[in-house]
Amino acid sequence: MYSFGLYPLITKPSRITDITATLIDNIFTNELQFQVNSGLLITDIRDHLPVFAICGNQFVCRCATPSQYRRIINTSTTDKLIAELNQRTWPNVTGTLYVNLSYNNFVCEFQDLLNKHCPVKRVKNTDNRYANNPWLTNGLKNACKKKNRLYKMFLSCRTLAAETRYKTYKNKLTSILRLSKKTYYSKLLVEHHNRQIYHVNIHDYNGKLTFVVCTYLFVV
């Protein structure tokens, strides 16, 4: 690699066990005029440590972070919306013979009520690393951090005792996480079933459930 003018950025072993330490992953570059920060990520997502390289760039464009807006939808706001919808007599909807006009009036009134009880507000950009894992309690989050600390401790001392302690804790935590996830979604399905939701679509992508209410009868 040196004969082609390529230089390694990773100089420490990326696969570490209690008896061996091997450099099996690397990043090579022939660009030496820019400052490059490189190293290993301490994580147990696979059997060897991921490598990274951050190359400096003098043409950095610092763009402002776009604001995020979100409609406030929760039990309290939806209950208020449903209550006022039930109180409406809809004279502008039922009092006209023109279907398009009736529909437009309904949409306008419904949109006004939606904005009143479930307004769109600006939200702060917060840490959303656990947003797609609602079954993670504070205790489980702390347990995940402890597991990472045990892994770092094993990489530092590389003893059989440290490896055994880390793997035992990891296996136990994995079982608890699976049980917590299963319990969370089972409870969620039961709660929505009790509310007489007619149809449920489950999307496993990103760990989210989407409940769709299908109405088959409209009374005007």
Image (tube, rainbow, N blue to C red):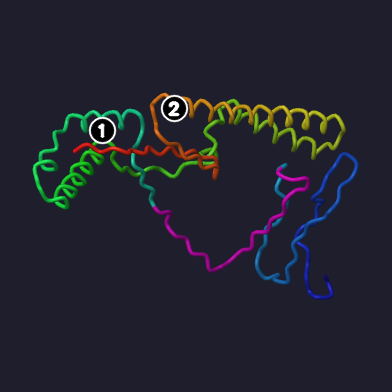
Amino acid type, residue under disc 1 in the picture? Leu
Q: Nearer the viewer, mark 2 or mark 1?
A: 2
Look at the picture and state if 31 lies above or below 175. Answer: below
Instruction: Give the quarter of the image for residue 211.
Output: top left
Rendered residue at 59%/29% (across/down): 182
Q: Indicate the position of residue 199 as horizontal and vertical percent values.
A: 42, 36
Amino acid type, residue under disc 2 in the picture? His
Residue named by callout 2: 193
Residue named by callout 1: 81
Question: For the residue carrying disc 1, how many other residues have a C-alpha within 10 Å: few (<14), some (14-19), or many (20+)?
Answer: some
User: In the rendered view, does 10 fall on the left or right side of 203?
Assistant: right
Q: Which residues are magenta?
A: 45-66
| Residue at the extreme bottom of the image, as rendered | 4
Magenta highlight on residue 63: yes
Look at the picture and state if 102 lies above or below 165. Answer: below
User: In the rendered view, does 112 fall on the left or right side of 2?
Assistant: left
Q: Indicate the position of residue 35 as horizontal and vertical percent values.
A: 66, 64
User: Which quarter shows the N terminus?
Assistant: bottom right
Element under disc 1: helix
User: Which quarter shows the C terminus?
Assistant: top left
Check contact, mark 2 vs mark 1: CB within 8 A: no
